[in-house]
Amino acid sequence: MVLRNKPPNEWLKVNVDAAFCCQKAATGLGMVLRNDAGEFIQARTLPIQGVFEVREAEALGVREALSWIRGLGLQRVVIETDAKYIVDGLLCPVLGESEHQQYIGKVKHAVFHTQKAARKRVVVSTEENVVASLDLRHGEIFWRHVLGSDDVIDQIDLALGKCNSYPVYIRFYVITLSSGGSVLRAWNLPDGQMVWESTLLGSKASKPLLLIPTNLKVNRDNVLFVYGNGFIHAVATIDGEVIWKKELASEGVDVQQLIYPDGSDTLYAVGLLGLSQFDVYQLDVKSGELLRHYNMLFPAGFSGDLSFVSDDTAVAMDSTGTALVAMHFQDGQISFHQTDVSQLIQDFSGELYVRTDRSNGFRALIVMEDHSLLLLQQGEIVWTREDGLASIMDVKASELPVEKDGVSVAKVEHNLFEWLKGHLLKLKGTLMIATPDDVAAIQKMRLQSSEKSKMTRDRNGFRKLLIVLTRAGKLFALHTGDGRIDPHYHALDENPSVLVVGRCGHTSDSAGVLSIVDTYTGEERNHMGPVHSIAHIIPLPFSDSMEQRLHLLVDANGHAHLYPRSAEALGIFQRDLGNIYWYSAETDKNILRGHGVRKNCVLEVSDEFCFDTRDLWSIVFPSESEKIAATATRSLNEVVHTQAKVTADQEVMYKFVSKNLLFLATVAPKAVGPIGSVTPDESSLVVYVIDTVTGRILHRMTHHGSQGPVQAVFSENWVVYHYFNLRAHRYEMSVIEIYDQARADNKEILKLVLGTHNLTSPITAYSRPEVFTKSQSYFFTHSVKSMAVTSTAKGITSKQVLLGTIGDQVLALDKRFLDPRRTVNPTQAEKEEGIIPLTDSLPIIPQSYATHALKVEGLRGIATVPSKLESTTLVFAYGVDLFFTHLAPSRTYDSLTEDFSYALLLLTIVALVAAIFVTWVWSEKKDLQEKWR
Amino acid sequence: MATYYVLIYLSLVLLLLPSALGISNGNVEGYSINGKVRFPAGTHLIEVAAIGYFFSPVRVDVSARNPGKVQAALTENRRVLTELVLEPLREEQYYEIREPFSPMSLLKSPMGLMIGFMAIVMFLMPKLVDAEELKRAQEEMGNQGVPSIANFLAGAQRTN
């Protein structure tokens, strides 16, 4: 029942309601116009053909009411309806979340929903395990759900759910079959809420099949048929109850299709037994009783799957691939027809995925090779979606070109006026006297003034190009200003470029492909390949005069190839030949190896860019007790600002900062499986900190009763890692900080300058480092999908550890919580230093979610890029969605906040000047009085 | 051990939330708001992810020896659950609430403090010095008179 409120004085009011008749598929709209006293003025009814969703009908009603009012020439009218969502939908402000983009991934199934009356949609499921409903007109997402990675969607279809006249119901459900045919779910089509879920159990894995007959009722319920795990199930679409089930796999028949001829009482299940027997089962749709089972042997054998032409004809290739066999099955009879097809083209390329909808002209949803999605209608592209961005594999940041000088005077004047106007508005905003129009103007101005979309470098270094590589092999440039995808053209002398490395096959010794791509134009500058195989890519800490970083690509034979292939690069490389080291972790063999470069390799064709490598050291982990689970190193371009840490009691601790440190975690081989599969006594986690030049183990620690998955991040002189503690049955995070013992006695300035480990003495990785470590562990509530650390330009700002949580949010956890010097009762001096009292678990403060209330569906990775402003770091999180934001771990101490009111500052100055003059006049008057006295 | 399963009816208190349910053993991850979930014997951890709410992970022990015996407890506060109803521990507020405008905040700003201090110096300080003392001071200073802003400004003009 709806409360009909009285309208304000002199206002009129329209009440709108909709009524449905499910059987006749018609909707009626009724509207009443009344004045503020509640007196009836006029009424109108309107029949509409077709059945709508409640929301849609109410929205139509509001639209009709608006046009009716306009026709009557009325102005002050309140519209009232009982569909709350409409009211919310009309009033809800649209937030400009330009930094959050939603994608779905490469589409693998699609179902159109193009009922005449309802909103046109297409329901898709994708390789990123997303089920989504898209607007057929614009390609926008109505709703979507990301299923777990081990709950792969096998089939989707639409089914008629509830249909009721009062209260109004006509519901279409999206049915998804996942997990190899064992989980069946129904989602409400208009809003995507899950309606029911059913688990279908079975004995053995089989091809999952889903069949939804358009008009079949068993006991007054609509039914759908599922074949999965060897069983055929009849399920009621309304609530997911299993009506009957029947096992078919007991004889080993591989069922390939379910067929239900419209209007009949029989369901056919057609499949193959082995490679040569064709089987047909006939079942009663009402009870699941097996009516008939007949088969026929095809001695030549089939190859591959059956394809179905009609309700009683299937086609397959024979085992030699030279003949096409058509099978007819009707009334218990099977007949084969062979056609010679040797002249047919063997390889049909599956680049395009076309699904047509017969009812409405020609409409095709096309998935391109780069995973983008486009809708073709009558030969025209209606919309496109760049869904390749749902599968980003790697991210690199690139600077934008410098802005050219020269701004016209007119522009400055215009800007000045706009600037003053803007600040007046802002002042109004702060004083809370702004009208809604003003607020809108402020918002608009903020969006404009940020000049986000400029293709030039900005003063703060916030505008960058993010070069992302997707799984489809497409390279995108994302502009961080507004997140648009636009490889814009800009002519400069030397544009930065990225090196893209690919592989032609799936094995590690297949040939590689190299490509150098201009980051501004998106053009490929140089393409090499197929070349040698690529096993490791080692970016070297050198760059040539063109600012191209040198890379060493190691092939499967242990030869290292230098890129770029120029004489200059070779010169730089040869100068530092003896100082190049790298490591490789062979997870399957449980070996960690260190490598160096020896000399040019000897090949049939001489190649001066090819070098022989040598093994320097190796660490073999005992395979019965340890298995490599995770490794982490410092980011190459990380900057460390201070070498030392001064504690509150005037002690100095020197950080052990080395580029060559590796964090490695191993778990017991039994504990490689999921959580709960081992007892605490059987499992342990061992962590190492290893110098990769000498292979020396600097630190080793065992966490008994713990297991993976391990996520780790290495920064400056500390490692933070996340794992599972089986004894407490909670997730845990630990921190290890590494300090230099050798320099620990440099407490006076004199020693610092002249002592053995003074500032000028060279540091070599070969000297035995004397280090000491501090470590501490804490409980953490959530599991972590990905981990990163903030990075700033100079490394002065304190760090935050970024955690991708199970809820696909990014939590920014202050490093101060992960400080091994925390104690339960810190002294006053320690408190002043900023040490937080120790608690057993890390706090999750909701305000510290970098994503706030947004979700980065299917979160896979987080990348951080320093901006020029020391306080600010740019964070890019990617998964099925993309999310970009600015983070200031120690607040924005080096710039004014966005809502700083310059106008208030100006006003204060004016007030002060005025006060000076007033007091001057005043004191002069007083002076005069004094003199007259 | 892995062949034995228990079907547990899970119900989430917030029915209308699009929630993800992750069960640590990897058998079922995805959506299950009110539904049967298959648990093999062993220990499991259920995590609920729902925007706007904080859920504690739930530890579920399915006994292998006594079929049907299931124990569940919240890991955050060790509370034992008698039935598997997943309730949020608390709501989460992701945004900091902007402080409403108040005259005090204007006064507390650096500019407000500046004006306030100036006002104190101008109006309160002369009141602190009583008239007699002032007179004595003036006499001591001779006939130079009270140093005032007017004199000061005039002096400044003269030097120009």
Image (cartoon, coloured by chain):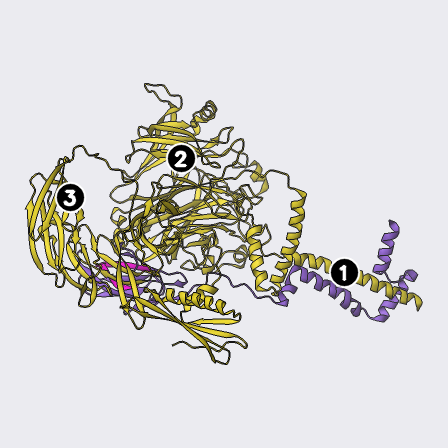
Tell me the residue that label 2 is attached to: A500
Are marks 2 and 1 in one subunit? Answer: yes
Query: Between disc 3 and disc 1, whose residue precedes?
Result: 3
Tell me the residue that label 3 is attached to: A315
Please say if the residues under marks 3 and 1 sit with CB atoms less than 8 Å apart.
no
Instruction: Give x and y (percent) for residue A727.
Output: 30, 57
Rendering colour (chain A): yellow
The amino acid type of the residue labelled 2 equals Val
Q: Which residues are magenta?
A: B32-47
Instruction: Give x and y (percent) for residue A317.
Output: 15, 39
The amino acid type of the residue labelled 3 equals Val
Q: In which chain is the residue bearing label 1?
A: A
In the image, residue A242 above or below residue A867: below
| Label ID, residue A914 | 1
Rendering colour (chain B): purple
Please say if the residues under marks 2 and 1 sit with CB atoms less than 8 Å apart.
no
